[in-house]
Image (cartoon, grey):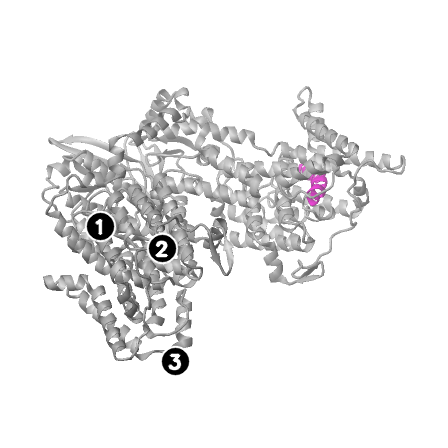
Amino acid sequence: MVRFRSMELTNVICIAIDAREHQDNTDVEDDCTEKFPSVGPMLTSKLGGFCNRKFLLKRFPILQWLPEYEANFLVEDIVAGLSVGLTVIPQGIAFAVMANLEPQYGLYSAFMGCFVYCVFGSCKDLTIGPTAIMALMVQVYVGSLGADFAILLTFLTGCIILMFGLLNLGFLVQFISMPVTAGFTSAAAITIASGQVKSLLGLPGRSNEFVHSWINVYQHIGQTKLWDALLGIATIIVLLVLRTLRGRSAVGKYLALARNAIVVIGGAALAYYFSTIGCKPFSLTGAVTPGLPPVGLPPFTTVLNNQTLGFSEMTSKLGSSIIALPLIAILETIAIVKAFSKGKSIDATQELVALGMCNIFGSIVSSMPITGSFTRTAVNNNSGVRTPLGGIATGVLVLLSLGLLTDTFYFIPKSVLAGVMIAAMFFMVEFHAAAEIWRTKKVDVIPFVVTLVSCPLLGLEYGMVIGIALNICFVLYMTSRPKIDQAILRTRSGIEAMVVKPDQSLIYTSIEYLKHEIVKMTDKTQVVTVIIDGSNVSYVDSTAAKIFSSIVEELTMRGRTVLLWNWNRSVRCTLIRLDKEQFYPLFKQGGLEQLDKEWLPSYKLEYLVDDIVAGLSVALTVIPQGIAYAAIANLDPQYGLYSAFMGCFVYAVLGSCKDVTIGPTAIMSLMVQAHVGNTGVEFAILSTFITGCLILLLGILNLGFLVQFISFPVTVGFTSAAAITIASGQVKSLLGIPGQSNEFLDSWINVVERIQDIRLWDTVLGLSTIVILLILMQMKNIKRNNCLRIVGKYITLSRNAIAVISGSLLAYALSDVGNVQPFLLTGNVTPGLPPLQLPPFTTSVDGHEYNFLEMIAELGTSLITLPLIAILESIAIAKAFSKGKAIDATQEMIALGISNIAGSFVSSMPVTGSFTRSAVNNNSGVRTQFGGIATGAVVLLALGLLTESFYYIPKATLAGVIIAAMFFMVEFDAAAEIWRTKRVDIIPMIGTLVACLLLGLEYGMMIGIGINICFVLHQISRPIVVPIRLTINGKDVLVLQADQSLVYSSAEYLKYFVLKQASKHPDAIIVLDGSHISSVDSTVAKVLVNMTHDMEHSNRRIVYWKWNRPVQCTLLRMERELFQNVFRNDENLDAIIKEGFLQQHTTLNHDV
């Protein structure tokens, strides 16, 4: 979004120039060298922290509260512990039944967490034990596998949570927003309640998921047991009535706290009475194994269906539960601790350590996975617990019940337990949270609803993943679309300047959008001076720096003077490291006329010769390359030529960059080989058609911005890995050995295994081809006289054709000498033009008939990766040759899509822009897109007249052509530039490079994109908050200024930082400066509410200063009474203090 405004200032140009001169004088090249932190001191500091008293007190909180324990706390802790015990015993039995385990396992899970948390826990109210959501997850994953799997899952859950705690990874929970949490909790409650309906009605059958539960009820509704149904419904009514008594009297309070125990005891007594008179109207829990649980290591082997399973087989059957359960356990516990912190800053790392230890120790006593329980924590709090010692009383009561009361559990009716569960679920469906989200930030309702719907339909774990992914997409879109202020500034003398001010840091996802908007703003005004205000920009990455350089170049070419104003030192250094000559003097003026996009109406006759020469040069390159690329793709040679002409014709009509040539490329050929190389040419042609359709769809929907999520380092890593993989795959043809070479590792394994089969003549010819190509490439550097320079230039441009023709002539000449051909040859190439027909929607391979859907399924992930790679290559090439012109990515995608669609009608494999041939086109002096028509015409002539001569092309020559080209695709220069500019960006580059080589190109690119997105998410979740301490009118004032907008993942960090600074400066007035915060979401609003309440609980006041109106409205919609008195927008902070704002609030009226 772009906001426009005008203002009049005096001498702004002078100020900008002064700023430029100041930066010139203060920035020294040596000072801009990026330095890594010293590893030694950092490790010493970290390791030293494990050996001091502060660490022991932090990791063993019992050492803090136990020495200060007072005798009068004991009674209150015991009463609270007994109250929780009376709640957890019936709940534990119910949760075990829900998890398809025997009832005693619910009690085995209810005591060890209480004991362990007493030592490691930091929140006095929290109780650890079985919960409904964890029981449901156990039912879904291990309900049919047996108790051994549940116990092992408890152990693994504890180990993973403990590892997260020790690695200080608690911040990952921040990426689960309030809407997703509310949607997940509500969906879990609905799923749990649905699963209990069958027990409530006394029906048979299983109920693993929401849909299955109701299908089971529908199928067995005729078998409803009247007495079970009546008892279950009565249980729910009694529980709801007892719950309403908690605020009416002291007796009512304890009746409400013990309501679960009351109904369970009542139901069991009723069932026992009926049994004494010989009547059994209810389905009962049945026998519960008496006594304490066995103590021993968790089961690492077990027997299932008469088959012994080892540890690895057990973990394999547990599947994704090993990830899902720790995540859910952490989420529940941290959420509860936050809710009951009452102004205290929570230590998420310590809570993870405590929860992990609770699960690990629990697995020793046959516990199922456990976590914090909101219901029992609320009971604990309402009972007046003073310290974590209350958990000891709860655990002792559970142990006593296991030792003494298990016989009585036999008579507990299942419908009563179902009623207990359903009544509890009424209050887990977060209607109030949904209303709060709708009121605060309506767009946040989308992840809430999507999570709420996905969880019951697809399963809780998949629903949560979908909700988190959707929220992350929202965040990434926000980072890719920064808000941009534009101001027209005028001096008194009439000089005008346009100031452009982005509202956030610049990263690879947002920089293309910024470039597009700045150019668009510039085109709408005649102002010559453009000032880019970087006061809100605290960070740029290497991709942003590189494209920012192109912004400066483009504006300079448009006759604009560019000045940088208010950029911080770290950002200036990043830009200087990229290009000191460009950025150090802060941009000199330059000019160049812009070329028109419409080339045909202004076409001149003198362009024709240049275009034809360039077209012939490209054709001499694409013909041997096309044959070689067909070989890479495991297709017959003619398909490389079929792919080489249609794109030229289509792009001449629809393309916007005169230099770009469309056709087969090495990377696309490699992708075709990986996905369809063994299934036949029909699959390759269909993939061309579908690739074109998807690219065209993305273009029409204007979704070209998606390419912005592939950063420069990832592109460099991918391109380099593709070049290494392609070259490795050609080694076998270079050496004349047989075998397949689909991937990097496979290629070299094949070479090593068949090294004894090397053919000498093929090897000599292949290596000679590479040497000759490298020598011919250097002839373009001849500068002695004009004639030799021109000859050298064209020899360099046609070097591939020269090498192929020479190799063919040698093979033809030697074919007449003796009866043995010394080289492996390309062989027969089908002569003539390709057939003009629809792409194949059905085919037959090895006697198996494939219809369209089966062909689509066979193509698999190539339907995503091929369009993505095609767009990436084509847009990158168009940018490289744009020479300051703005690139219309949407039009480029439309041109590329139609090129592939049209190509599929002439049996083309997938095509995209070729960097090599585009460079040839440019160096040949092409003037318009007509050069592409000349290229296509020459290829058609070659197909019609020269195919017989292609028979003699040696495979080693083609391999040499490809390998020589790959030397220059490994981007050493780009890697050095990334290292020089922003060293941390080398990580996604190396990650992409290594992953592509080891796992394949598509997986490698996804890993690289994933690494980059993690970097982005970490950056936005850790805003830079600058503390500034002032003294105003004798009062200490601490101003905290965040450097970017706030999203859900950064909310907890901001709260933690503010509370930490407030505790460091107990007498200071806290002022939270929001001048750089342009938006907040509902999660941030909720956290700010909690933070403000926490400050009030600590008798501290907080001022929200310079927060813009939309953000104020969002917070006021969340909680008007709290926020209506805390906002001030006075420019002068002194005025706020002088007015005594902190002592006497003035109510602000807002139209929200």
Horizontal and vertical percent for residue 276? 25, 77
Mark 1 and mark 3 residues within 8 Å of each other at the beta carbon? no
Which residue is at the front of the view, 1137 or 285? 285
Label the magenta part by its dominant secondary structure.
helix
Q: Which mark is residue 694?
A: none
Looking at the image, which residue is at 27% across and 75% down?
231
Q: CA distance from mark 1 to mark 3?
A: 47 Å
Magenta stretch in the rendered image: 607-631
Q: Amino acid at mark 2?
A: Met
Residue at image mark 3: 222
Q: Is residue 1130 visible?
A: no
Residue at image mark 2: 368
Horizontal and vertical percent for residue 945? 80, 46
Q: Quadrant of the C terminus?
A: bottom left
Residue 146 in the magenta stretch? The answer is no
Q: Amino acid at mark 1?
A: Ile
Looking at the image, which residue is at 12% across and 51% down?
75
Q: Amino acid at mark 3?
A: Gly
Q: CA distance from mark 3 to mark 2?
A: 34 Å
Q: Secondary structure at mark 1?
A: helix
* Dot 2 crowding, Cα within 10 Å, few <14, some 14–19, many 20+: many
Q: Secondary structure at mark 2?
A: loop
Residue at image mark 1: 392
Q: Earlier in the sequence, mark 2 or mark 1?
A: 2
Mark 2 and mark 1 residues within 8 Å of each other at the beta carbon? no
152 relative position to 1024: left or right: right
